Amino acid sequence: MTGLDPLERIDEIMNYVESARSVPMSSRNCMVDRGEIIAMLDELRAELPGELRRSQALLEERDKIIAAGQREAERIITEGEAEHARLVSANEVAVSAEHEANRIVGEAREESQRLREECEEYVDTTLGNFERLLTKSLATIERGRDKMHALREIGSYAPDDEELSETSMS
């Protein structure tokens, strides 16, 4: 199972459980090697913190992008205000300077808002994908645990010689 992403691992565990031999006289229960399924789930659990770290890194990256956008917006606003002050000082262009400064400040605010919305959309999409991964992982783990509990409730099952020969033939 090495080298698979968590969703592929979940698919592999599901295939393993789905292909397991049914318990006699039961359409819902099957027999799996407890040690093997636990090992598979342990490997999946070991990888999930990496996925969580990647998600945290994405959040930190989003915060850096937003901060950079805010700094850029502040710089543009400061430049706009400086330009505004310079233009206003000249009487003959006072009116046009104020309009230009307002335009620059408005553009800076719009650009800042646009950057913020893009960052939030990117992070929301990424977190949504990660949420789906975790939801699938938890559902798979829950199904696996339910199956393990069901096997535990029916007790250990020792196949007879005829069933062992059928298993080795398949």
Image (cartoon, grey):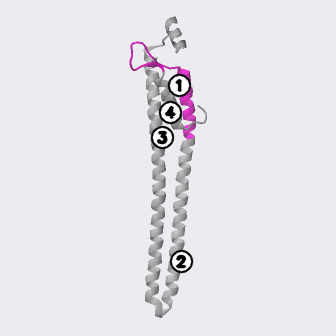
What residue would you read off at disc 2?
79
Q: Secondary structure at mark 4?
A: helix
Q: Is residue 144 left or right of residue 39?
A: left
**Residues tagged 4 and 2 counted as in contact (Cβ below 8 A):** no
Whether residue 111 is situated above or below residue 82 in the rendered picture: above
Please give the range of residues in magenta.
20-49
Task: Tell me the residue that label 1 is attached to.
Answer: 37
Residue position marked by numbered label 4 in the rendering:
10
The answer to whether one can see residue 160 in this image is no
Neighbourhood count class around disc 1 (C-alpha, 10 Å): few under 14, some 14–19, many 20 upward: some
Tag 4 and tag 1, C-beta contact below 8 Å: no
**Marks 4 and 3, Cα distance to the nearest angstrom?**
10 Å
Q: Amino acid at mark 2?
A: Glu
**Residue 150, percent from left and from top:** 43, 20
CA distance for labels 4 and 2: 54 Å
Residue located beneath label 3 in the image: 133
Identify the residue at horizontal 46%, vertical 13% (top origin).
155
What whole-number distance in Å separates the C-alpha atoms at marks 3 and 2?
45 Å
